[in-house]
Image (tube, rainbow, N blue to C red):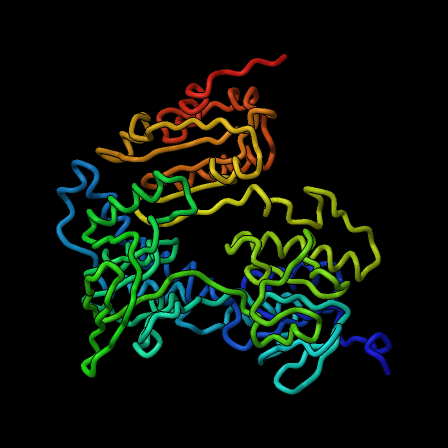
Amino acid sequence: MTAAQVSPAYDLIVIGAGPVGENVADYATKRGLRVAIVESELVGGECSYWACMPSKALLRSGSALRAAERLDGARQAVTGRVDVPAVLARRDAFAGHWKDDGQVDWLRSAGIDLLRGRGRLTGPGTVDVDGRAYTATAVAVATGSLPVLPDVPGLADAQPWGTRDATSAPSVPPRLLVVGGGVAGTELATAYASLGSRVTLVARSTLLDREEPFAGDHVARALTQLGVDVRTHVTPERVDRDAAGSVTTRLSDGTTVASEEILVATGRRANTLDLGIETVGQRPGDWLPVDDTMLVAGTDWLYAVGDVNGRALLTHQGKYQARAAGEAIAARVNGTPVHAEPWGDHVATADHAAVPHVVFTDPEVARAGLTEAQARSRGVAVRAVEYELGSVAGATLHADGYEGRAKLVVDEDRHVVVGATFVGPDVAELLHSATIAIVGEVPLERLWHAVPSYPTISEVWLRLLEAYGRPHSD
């Protein structure tokens, strides 16, 4: 009997029960499909237990304390430092104490079957879960990504922290070396410096080098003010941990750093090594290439959603893809039309040029869409304008000596915003307005009629438009 002749036990099997997998399963279930989800660890995934939620819980208390210290009248009332045990306890609560009972209950209430174990593809529409075979009309892979460990002599033997270790650590090391100047590295350096660790951060380039250049500059200055020893354009060359547990790291500039722990945050790879994707013509360890409905190239039944496809390694963007994929899978299984045109019901069009994200350092870095360099590399006729956030009335009220910067990247041919970056304390809440402007392709002529409330930091929108100059309709 061929695979095509087997009656599938499920309409859809999802491998990976993180937020992305849960959303694929939920949306397909709501469209009448019989769905199972496979998970070998905790239902709820990386974001719930080791990434988004615990990391932001580690960051928030220090951020709130510094916010008070920036205001005359409030700073005089600050009489102590961050209570580390209380912060860690709050972190533990947000991570559900690393128990997934509530998430399992939600799956049950949603009508989604949970298959506990490690799922592997064994052929078209077939999944092995710890030795038991299951079949389905469609399979969605939502296994996420894993950290990359650089090939540095002695590093693996030194038992370095990954981001999971850093976000779930039961105590704060006196000294911490952070390797990596990207989002995870800068956020966790901020968190641990706030919690009292003496942090050294090393980066092979500048900090946040995928953002507008001023973003990394602002964050580097702030980390230095927080007591972090920031070293850019340097890499580890040798790592050793002695019998007492101390780590010594020799750097490419000839200096050494001593620490109790070393955290490696230097990038991620697709979690596809032990997934069986070689049975469907893909190479283990590679990102899975997909179309905008998340259908894997060369198949009509396999989908890859979230980090595993390499499009946008962000939880919220993965959940966006999951909504599109769940609807597309259900439409195909049910034999109803698939709306695959740009911005249609079954596609993740925003992945290409309208992705929002926030770096929760202090100051925050918030960007939607493209940087100026990215836009130019795509051949966009670019004009960019910038404005100092500290000159906006709402910002001066928000914090004494407020420092920050905002930038719009404009497509001059279409007179629409294709990128926006904000750097400063509490700028994350400015981002969705930029996302809407980019996704909606709102003409600059119309944006002049979107009046920001006074006195808020959002008034920077008006200042940026004034810096650009008012376009006139033909």
Residue 257 position within the rendered picture, expressed as x and y whole percent measured from the top left:
20, 65
Residue reaching furthest bottom?
A: 131
Q: Please identify the quarter of the rendering in which residue 155 is found.
A: bottom left
Residue at position x 52%, y 35% in the image: 376
Residue 218 position within the rendered picture, expressed as x and y whole percent measured from the top left:
29, 41
Q: Nearer the viewer, residue 448 or 375?
A: 375
Residue 42 position within the rendered picture, expressed as x and y whole percent measured from the top left:
50, 73
Q: Please identify the quarter of the rendering in which residue 8 is found.
A: bottom right
Position above or below: 47 against 469: below
Residue at position x 29%, y 34% in the image: 398
Q: Which part of the image, by quadrant, shows the C terminus?
A: top right
Answer left or right for 79 relative to 55.
left
Q: Please identify the quarter of the rendering in which residue 344 is found.
A: top right
Residue at position x 52%, y 40% in the image: 369
Q: Which part of the image, by quadrant, shows the N terminus?
A: bottom right
What is the tally of numbered marks visible in this picture?
A: 0
Residue 56 position within the rendered picture, expressed as x and y whole percent measured from the top left:
37, 56
Position above or below: 382 against 147: above
Q: Nearer the viewer, residue 328 or 420?
A: 420
Position above or below: 369 against 137: above
Answer left or right for 260 relative to 206.
left
Residue at position x 39%, y 67% in the image: 150
